[in-house]
Image (cartoon, rainbow, N blue to C red):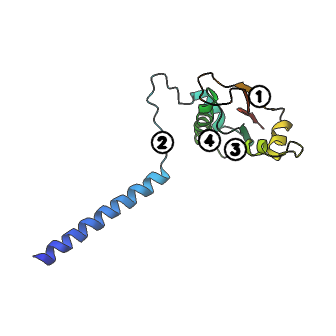
């Protein structure tokens, strides 16, 4: 009886393991999103889906961002990443996007040009000035500089 009970437990374990492996394989190959907002705020319009899926030439969106921006810009990067991921999912192989962190270049010597900032400048994108909120508990309430901008090529 003990031997039969043990073989049943091993069989159950192997069956559960097989189910988990199959679900994992299906989950990694199948992709879908579900927008439950009333106004479909996080979904692409049918026109946007059609346009991006019929691209005939490569389109690359470059997004230049500074980390840890003050409100209201602090949620913009996540929103853009999600939105561009939606476009990439709806698009074909011709749609690409890339985020550039320009924070590292702001730490260096001002006399040494940063390649990321030079790339942004080649598209006509320069730092923007943003005021910190008075509610911020920072010792510095002066202006900050940021890069919440993008361009497409």
Query: Which residue does the numbered mark 2 point to in the structure image?
Result: 32
- Which numbered disc flags the more N-terminal residue, 2 or 1? 2
Marks 2 and 4 sit apart, C-alpha to C-alpha, by 13 Å
Q: Where 25 sits versus 59, above or below?
A: below
**Which of pointers 4 and 3 indicates the residue nearer the eye?**
4
Q: At x 75% / y 26%, what residue is drawn?
A: 129
Among the 4 quarters of the image, the one containing residue 139: top right
Marks 3 and 1 sit apart, C-alpha to C-alpha, by 30 Å
Q: Are marks 4 and 3 in contact (CB under 8 Å)?
A: no
Query: Which residue does the numbered mark 3 point to in the structure image?
Result: 94
Tell whether 64 sits left or right of 134.
Answer: right
Marks 4 and 3 sit apart, C-alpha to C-alpha, by 9 Å
Query: Which residue does the numbered mark 1 point to in the structure image?
Result: 128
Find residue 92 and report its horizontal and vertical position in percent. Answer: 64, 43
**Which of pointers 3 and 1 indicates the residue nearer the eye?**
1
**Which of pointers 1 and 4 indicates the residue nearer the eye?**
1
Query: Which residue does the numbered mark 4 point to in the structure image?
Result: 88
- Which numbered disc flags the more N-terminal residue, 2 or 4? 2
Q: At x 77% / y 44%, what residue is drawn?
A: 107
Among the 4 quarters of the image, the one containing residue 1: bottom left
């Amino acid at each position: 009886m003990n031997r039969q009970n043990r073989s049943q437990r091993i069989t159950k374990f192997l069956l559960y393991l097989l189910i988990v492996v199959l679900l994992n394989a299906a989950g990694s190959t199948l992709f879908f999103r579900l927008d439950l907002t009333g106004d479909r705020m996080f979904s692409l319009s049918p026109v946007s889906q059609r346009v991006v899926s019929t691209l005939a030439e490569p389109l690359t969106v470059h997004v230049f961002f500074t980390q840890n921006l003050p409100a209201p810009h602090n949620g913009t990067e996540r929103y853009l990443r999600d939105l561009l991921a939606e476009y990439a999912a709806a698009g074909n192989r011709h749609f690409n996007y890339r985020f550039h962190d320009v924070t590292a270049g702001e730490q260096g010597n001002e006399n040494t040009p940063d390649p990321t900032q030079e790339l942004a400048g080649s598209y006509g994108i320069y730092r923007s000035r943003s005021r910190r909120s008075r509610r911020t508990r920072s010792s510095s309430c002066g202006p900050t500089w940021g890069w919440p901008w993008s361009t497409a090529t």
